[in-house]
Image (cartoon, helix red, strand yellow):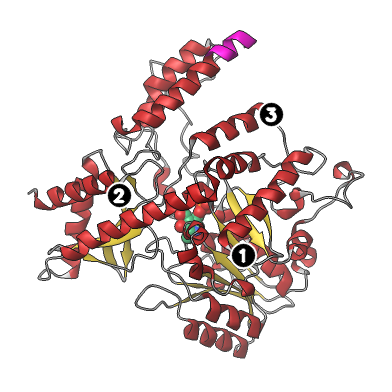
Amino acid sequence: MDKETFRKYGYEFVDWIADYFENVRQYPVRSTASPGDVKSQLPVHPPEEGEDMSAIWKDFNKIILPGMTHWQHPGWFAYFPANNSPASVLGEMLTAGLGAQCMSWETSPAATELEEVVMDWLRQMIGLPEGFRGVIQDTASTATLTALLTAREVATGFSCNEKGLYRYQGNSEIRTPRPGAENVPGEETATGHYQKEENHHELQGQFPAEQSHGERPGAGRVLRVYASSEAHSSIEKGVKIAGYGRENLCYIPTDENYAMRADNLEQAIKKDLEAGLKPACVIATIGTTSSTAVDPLPEIGRICRKYSLWLHVDAAMAGTAAILEEKRDMLKGAEFIDSLVFNPHKWMLTNFDCSAYFVSNPEHLIRTMSINPEYLKTSRDKQVNNYRDWGIQLGRRFRALKLWFVIRQYGVNGLKEMVRNHISMAQWFAGRVNDSRGFELMAPVNASLVCFRWNDGKTADKELDSINRLLLAKINESGEVYLTHTTLSGRYTLRLSVGQRTTEKADVERAWEIIKAARDSP
Ligand code: PLP
């Protein structure tokens, strides 16, 4: 592509994004595509010859856009947000333009030093004690896996990395067949597009939970990890990948507000110690996915200190709320934390991906992750931070740039204002639910998520589940809003999560109208 064509499309795309920001509400929030709709329009084989950008751009609009769900839509109330902002998109554009791979200080000193600075800004913003040091990870899942690996090493005197896992199950390789291996992949249709019906996704999440082929105890004690029964699935995934074994993730019961019961945690640790197991790590959640429940950090922290356990905090969504003085209590007990993650890519206007991971002592992390082959050594290694030693991957994107743009362009006060507005909109909505006969709140509103359901007070729970499932489907049919669900105490629960940059009070009011209309429609 010559410079002039690049310029032409560059301007055109920026214009398009600017219009998209303004007009995103014209699209249905959730894509109306059916499975296979997009793929069936795409050629099976890559083009032999380069194509003109005008053709690619045309197909973006015709094929890709209708298959997109619009996370930046003001009617986005699903899951948690993944919001962006003009400042972050501009920063991301420069990152892509620079195209640097920022694994070491020397491979781009500005990337490393800016990351150190913006992470320290974030530390100050959420009120973590001095001495905590930060690194940007791609996601909270990766950060939590990193914490679990570090906790494993700390609990075993850094010997798992050297000698392998102490105790493991299974003495024969277990491989499940590659899903769909028997099919001819990507069979061509007469039009040269992918067949629509090709489908082997039913296997996802269907692998058997246990495939025990007999135990082979190693030299060490079995390591145990503790998290509340409301903890995010990334914890279970991390426990599996880090070699603890899923059965060594001990789920601690929660109280009536879905927060971990610290007394039950201590009992579980004591029981494991008596059984000869080795408690290694506790993961506390500040803002659970289902209901933004807040685990009692000071109590959990004291228990971790007493038994010398690693304390990791998953504050993926709600960590951002700690920038508000009135929400600082969420991180009370921070002095006990060994590691913490929260996601600026959720609720801090920094487009995906950008996850902030903090450790109270980087030495443990670096010792766990560091590998120093000759070809990566530089003359500055003793003077600088090489962030490649702070995580799993070697290659690193320059993510600090977009975060720097965002924090500078909004200022801490601008970010606070957005978070406060979202919380107040959620409170307003919770008030409507509370005041209305036929709806009920299902959990306390700790940040900007409201959990609720329809309940006339006369219908049995099981039937309420089906009614609320239908209600959610009707609400989402509107195309104006998108809500998702969870279960709380086994009851089907609707979630309205406020956190999109463009959402205004009128959008939450409209959501309430749509919800009431869906309830009243036959
Ligand atoms: N932890 C919590 C509490 C979450 O709510 C989520 C996602 O919503 C995650 C972890 C996973 O975040 P990520 O997609 O950054 O891995």
Point out the image quarter for the N terminus.
top right
Decide which of tag 1 and tag 2 comes sooner along the chain: 1
Which residue matches tag 2? 483
Direction from residue 376 to residue 239 in the image, left or right: left
**Residue 280 painted magenta:** no
Tell me if residue 5 can be seen. Answer: yes
Decide which of tag 1 and tag 3 comes sooner along the chain: 3
Alpha-carbon span between mark 3 and mark 2? 38 Å
For this orientation, the residue located farthest to the left is 522
Q: Is residue 214 above or below residue 86?
A: below
Q: Which residues are magenta?
A: 3-8
What residue is drawn where x is 32% and y is 39%?
30
Amino acid beneath label 2? Leu
The answer to the question of whether label 1 and label 3 lie on touching residues, with beta carbons closer than 8 A, is no
For this orientation, the residue located farthest to the bottom is 274
Alpha-carbon span between mark 1 and mark 2? 33 Å
User: How many residues crowd mark 3 within 10 Å: few (<14), some (14–19), many (20+)?
Assistant: few
What residue is drawn where x is 50% and y is 39%?
181
Q: Element type at marker 2?
A: strand
Q: Is residue 264 above or below residue 470?
A: below
Mark identifier at residue 60: none
Q: Residue 179: give x, y in percent of width and height.
A: 48, 44
Numbered disc in front, either 1 or 3:
1
Which residue matches tag 1? 128
Alpha-carbon span between mark 1 and mark 3? 32 Å
The answer to the question of whether label 1 and label 2 lie on touching residues, with beta carbons closer than 8 A, is no
Which residue matches tag 3? 98
